[in-house]
Image (cartoon, helix red, strand yellow):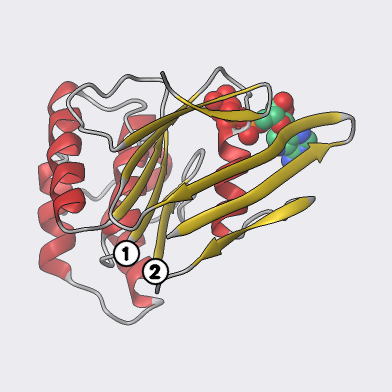
Amino acid sequence: MIVFQHISKSFHQNLVLKDVYLSIEEGSLIRMSGPNGCGKSTLLKIAVGLMKSDAGEVVYEDKHHIGALIENPCFIENETGLYNLKFLYNLKNRYDDQKVRALLKKFLLDPNLKIPVKKYSVGMKQKLGIIQAIMEDQNVIYLDEPTRGLDEESVKFFYQLIDDLHRQGKTIIICSHEELNELHFDKEFVLKDGILNKKI
Ligand SMILES: Nc1ncnc2c1ncn2[C@@H]1O[C@H](COP(=O)(O)OP(=O)(O)OP(=O)(O)O)[C@@H](O)[C@H]1O
């Protein structure tokens, strides 16, 4: 279980999250939606420990290895996509070349592409961002607007990928404006005016 225990966060006078409470069962596929600027990214940053809340905390009751794509993924811009993924993997010393290359191909990216990431489109970077969030077999996965900039075929692969990860029992939280109709969410929430409600 992951429990968002009454999270509040303001930026100066701007109260972005108001006592957000959410409990997520292990293995759930969750969607969070809401208007632009409603605080989805802020909530995810707090969940992964990139930002401090003013009040409340996110408690992970089970063993967790977090993978996350939040806002614009950052890479070493002068290196290739494969180099970047290898680099991120090598930080943990478990690089699986076959797996990474297969994921790149499924997302229609040539693993041997020599152009540096700084020349990648938004969608290409987004694909690297998704891959790095799942490639180490992370069991808690946060994805912020994952389909942004993706071509149609890659969106189809994304659906398949999430479906597989869900079947494998990963806990997946997706923030998206898109309906993502092909995915079978266990629960859907809407964040509006800093308040999180179950989608009806
Ligand atoms: N570091 C910061 N300093 C000041 N204000 C911030 C900061 N980060 C976010 N905000 C403000 O908090 C609010 C929520 O931002 P956030 O990025 O979490 O929204 P969002 O729901 O992810 O939006 P979008 O869907 O457009 O990406 C916005 O009003 C934003 O301007």
Residue at disc 2, CB closer than 8 Å to ligand 1: no
Q: Which mark is residue 65?
A: 2
Which element is circle 2 on?
loop
| Rendering quadrant holding ligand 1 | top right
Considering only vertical position in the picture, is 183 above or below 81?
Answer: above
Task: State whether residue 80 appears in this view.
Answer: no
Q: Nearer the viewer, residue 172 or 2?
A: 2
- Identified at 21% across, 24% down, the residue is 151
Asked if the residue at tag 2 contacts the one at tag 1, i.e. Cβ–Cβ closer than 8 Å, the answer is yes
Classify residue 185 by image quadrant. Answer: top left
Residue hosting label 1: 138
Quadrant in which the N terminus is drawn: bottom left
Mark 1 within 8 Å of ligand 1, using the beta carbon:
no
Q: Quadrant of residue 20?
A: top right
The residue shown at (70%, 35%) is: 17
Tell me which amino acid carries mark 1.
Gln
Q: Is residue 142 above or below residue 26?
A: above
Q: Nearer the viewer, residue 195 or 72?
A: 195
